[in-house]
């Protein structure tokens, strides 16, 4: 059982990408999922999360108004739509299970990191 990320790539500033997090070997319904990113030389940062029950979401301040998290349990997938990308969004993005998702609290992941998907924002 694992979460598999995809959708990253090279994009110019102002561009958009949609990341996907697909559950393999288990059903995503019932799980609260978060997106995290690790920029070169930095620690992992919680970017966003979405609750499994009431749909509560969290966004780190730097992405508010630009990123949108959503989930499609029928497709066993959580998405991160990223618009108006900036060079500082460059990082490897991971998804992970989190215990809870609250609007004002950064998510805390559990389990090990997967391979992630690399996002590079550059002109």
Image: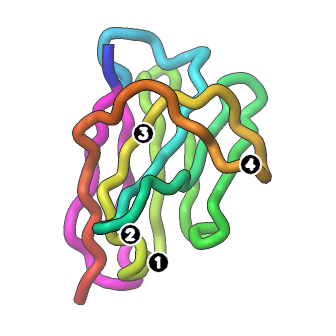
Residue identifier under label 2? 16
Instruction: From the top left corner, tell me how far across and down residue 6 is, in percent.
Output: 27, 44
Residue for point 36% across, 42% down:
20
Residue for point 38% across, 55% down:
18
- Around disc 4, counting alpha carbons within 10 Å, would you say few (fewer than 14), some (14 to 19), or many (20 or more)? few
Circle nearer the N terminus (1, 2):
2
Q: Are marks 1 and 3 in contact (CB under 8 Å)?
A: no
Q: Are marks 1 and 2 in contact (CB under 8 Å)?
A: yes
Residue for point 37% across, 22% down:
23
Task: Look at the magenta stretch and give its main secondary structure.
Answer: strand
Instruction: Tell me how far mark 3 sits from mark 2, CA to CA.
Output: 18 Å
Residue identifier under label 4? 105
Residue 8 image-quadrant placement:
bottom left
The residue lying toward the viewer, choosing from 43 and 29, is 43
- Magenta-drawn stretch contains 60: no
Residue identifier under label 1? 84
- Around disc 3, counting alpha carbons within 10 Å, would you say few (fewer than 14), some (14 to 19), or many (20 or more)? many
Q: Which residues are magenta?
A: 3-22
């Amino acid at each position: 059982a694992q979460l598999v990320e995809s959708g990253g790539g090279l994009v110019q500033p102002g561009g958009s990408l949609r990341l996907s997090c697909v559950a393999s070997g288990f059903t995503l319904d019932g799980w609260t999922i978060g997106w995290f990113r690790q920029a070169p030389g930095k620690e992992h940062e919680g970017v966003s999360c979405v609750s499994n029950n009431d749909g509560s979401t969290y966004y780190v301040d730097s992405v508010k108004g630009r990123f949108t998290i959503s989930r499609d349990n029928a497709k066993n997938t959580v998405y991160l739509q990223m618009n108006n990308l900036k060079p500082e969004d460059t990082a490897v993005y991971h998804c992970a299970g989190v215990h809870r998702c609250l609007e004002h609290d950064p998510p805390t992941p559990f389990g090990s990191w997967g391979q992630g998907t690399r996002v590079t924002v550059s002109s």
